Image (cartoon, helix red, strand yellow):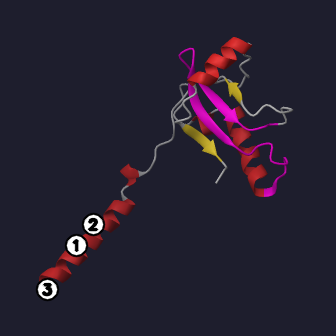
Amino acid sequence: MKTLIIVIILSLIGCTEQLTDSSSQPKPLAACGFDNPKQQLSWLKDLIAKADEDRATMAFKGNYLGIIYLEKYQNQDVFWVEMMMNSGGLMGRAFQCEGTIIEFTNETGQNFHKGLRRDVVVYSNQY
């Protein structure tokens, strides 16, 4: 019986250590030459602030609800933003690191969309 109690106590101590281990905490996403572009790219930080406000208060009528992905385009980091952002009907836009919108032709836009991986989420305010 003593052995069982000791095993249980040691197991609980091990679980507590695992929960507080800082090495298991997610690290900020590096992109565009920055360790934490969500904080270091002012345009992206502003966009995320609007998205947070829209989620909390619907201040922008849902135009900033969605997901931001990190993608590659022409071997460069780009952000694919799936939010309406008062676009008049476009459900997504691609942004270069400095915040400029990438203008696609029909052909380049189709190729970009075919290559979207949507596997690296930078931000989401969807449940």
The tag on residue 96 is: none
- Residue at which label 1 appears: 10
Q: Say which residue appears at 46% left-offset and 43% top-offset.
A: 27
User: Residue lying furthest bottom in this view?
Assistant: 1
Say which element carries label 1: helix
**Image mark count:** 3
Q: Is residue 77 visible?
A: no
Residue 72 image point, x, y percent:
55, 22
Q: Amino acid at mark 1?
A: Leu
- Residue at which label 2 appears: 14
Residue 67, magenta (yes or no): yes
- Residue at which label 3 appears: 2
Q: Report the span colored magenta.
A: 57-85
In primary-sequence order, the first of circles 1 and 3 is: 3
Specify the quadrant of the image occupied by residue 112.
top right
| Classed neighbour count for the residue bearing mark 2: other residues with Cα under 10 Å, few (<14), some (14–19), many (≥20) | few
96 versus 64 height, above or below: above
Q: Answer whether labels 2 and 1 touch (C-beta < 8 Å).
A: yes
Q: Say which residue appears at 73% left-offset and 22% top-offset.
A: 100
